């Protein structure tokens, strides 16, 4: 007997809802169209996006890929997905900004165990908002259903950005000298790193209701505090890129992990503790988990989301032009590989 006569297997039976996927394609296209300018070309099909590069005499393409990590868990517990969609764009654009690049186009990857049209629409709305904010075209992406790979309600999210910089204006840290100044641009909160530790110290996997409770020292509920958007630095810093020698996006690894890669050997970035505000959310995390100072500075941004290295004139321009920029330290001479120190240590 023919197997098909007794048990007709289907893709839907295996957990992949093709009809549901087709139903959201038009909405995804509408979100993407909101971000398009004349540089985005009609490729006549959905396999790849096309972008016409212009206005750069000696272009260097700058690319980055990243995800929002286990902040997704908090978003799922609260049902707040637009914010992590915006975060996805922001954090990738912040990364290419450290090379002096402006964003051109963005692609996303979203994967579910089972299709959730409402969740996908909220994510795509947030991604489109993030792209519009930063002048970045959403020209493609992939939505995948992977039954059996994730637990039923879990999903993953990643983003890919391509930007451009003039070769002559790339930020490579080559001109950094002892005496240069460190200018910090504050973060809005935890941003998108350290959430595995956050979930552990507050016991959020076992007690998600804690997200809705007030926390001592915080003006918002814990959930609202943790879901604050990852701050976008490109609009703030683009006018000053010609006066900056290096930029460091302070994400996982904190100041000790993220500053040395932008510095030449033979120097250290010496930060003055107390020169910037450590946000109350970090005090709450440290107290809840009895986390050491060293671990806090290694995992979190501790209130500084971006750090610029400038000479005196560049620092003066940033400090006068960016409302909340703060002078947080200096470059000092130090033998060996580049490193981070704190004044008084």
Image (tube, rainbow, N blue to C red):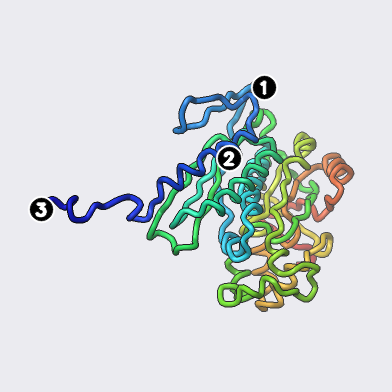
Marks 3 and 2 sit apart, C-alpha to C-alpha, by 53 Å
Q: Is residue 124 above or below residue 191?
A: above
Q: Earlier in the sequence, mark 3 or mark 2?
A: 3
Mark 1 closeness class: few <14, some 14–19, many ≥20 residues within 10 Å: few
Mark 3 closeness class: few <14, some 14–19, many ≥20 residues within 10 Å: few
Check residue 55 in the rendering and tell me which mark sits there, or answer none: 1
Q: Residue at x 78, y 70 (%)?
A: 218
- Quadrant into which the C terminus falls: bottom right
Q: Which residue is mark 3?
A: 1
Residue in the foreground of this view, choosing between 45 and 309: 45
- From this viewpoint, which residue is outermost toward the left? 1
Judged left or right of residue 207, residue 178 is right
Judged left or right of residue 67, residue 6 is left
Q: Are marks 3 and 2 in contact (CB under 8 Å)?
A: no
Residue in the foreground of this view, choosing between 278 and 313: 278
Marks 2 and 1 sit apart, C-alpha to C-alpha, by 19 Å
Check residue 135 in the rendering and tell me which mark sits there, or answer none: none
At numbered mark 1, what does the secondary structure look like: helix, strand or loop?
loop
Q: Is residue 175 above or below residue 189?
A: above
Q: Which residue is mark 2?
A: 161
3 vs 2, front mark = 3
At numbered mark 3, what does the secondary structure look like: helix, strand or loop?
loop
Question: In the picture, residue 71 is in which quadrant?
Answer: bottom right
């Amino acid at each position: 007997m023919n197997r098909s006569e007794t048990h007709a297997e289907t893709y839907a039976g295996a957990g992949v809802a093709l009809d549901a996927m087709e139903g959201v394609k038009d909405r995804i296209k509408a979100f993407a169209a909101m971000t398009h300018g004349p540089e985005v070309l009609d490729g006549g099909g959905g396999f790849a996006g096309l972008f016409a590069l212009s206005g750069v005499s000696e272009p260097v393409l700058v690319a980055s890929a990243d995800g929002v990590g286990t902040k997704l868990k908090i978003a799922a517990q609260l049902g707040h997905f637009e914010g992590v969609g915006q975060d996805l764009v922001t954090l990738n654009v912040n990364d290419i900004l450290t090379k002096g690049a402006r964003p051109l186009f963005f692609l996303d990857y979203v994967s579910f165990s089972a299709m959730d049209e409402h969740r996908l629409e909220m994510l795509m709305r947030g991604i489109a908002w993030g792209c519009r904010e930063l002048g970045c075209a959403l020209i493609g992406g992939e939505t995948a259903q992977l039954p059996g790979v994730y637990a039923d309600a879990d999903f993953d999210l990643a983003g890919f950005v391509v930007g451009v910089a003039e070769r002559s204006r790339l930020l490579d840290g080559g001109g950094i000298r002892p005496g240069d100044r460190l200018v910090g641009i504050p973060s809005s909160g935890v941003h998108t790193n350290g959430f595995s530790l956050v979930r552990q110290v507050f016991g959020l996997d076992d007690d998600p209701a804690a997200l809705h409770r007030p926390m001592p020292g915080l003006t918002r509920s814990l959930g609202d505090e943790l879901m604050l958007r990852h701050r976008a630095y490109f609009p703030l810093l683009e006018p000053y890129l010609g006066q900056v020698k290096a930029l460091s996006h302070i994400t996982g690894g904190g100041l000790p992990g993220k500053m040395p890669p932008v510095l030449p050997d033979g120097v250290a970035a010496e930060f003055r503790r107390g020169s910037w505000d450590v946000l109350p959310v970090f005090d709450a995390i440290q107290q809840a988990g009895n986390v050491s100072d060293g671990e806090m500075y290694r995992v979190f941004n501790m209130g500084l989301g971006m750090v610029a290295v400038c000479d005196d004139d560049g620092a003066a321009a940033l400090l006068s032009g960016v409302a909340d920029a703060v002078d947080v330290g200096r470059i000092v001479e130090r033998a060996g590989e580049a490193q981070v120190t704190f004044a008084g240590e």
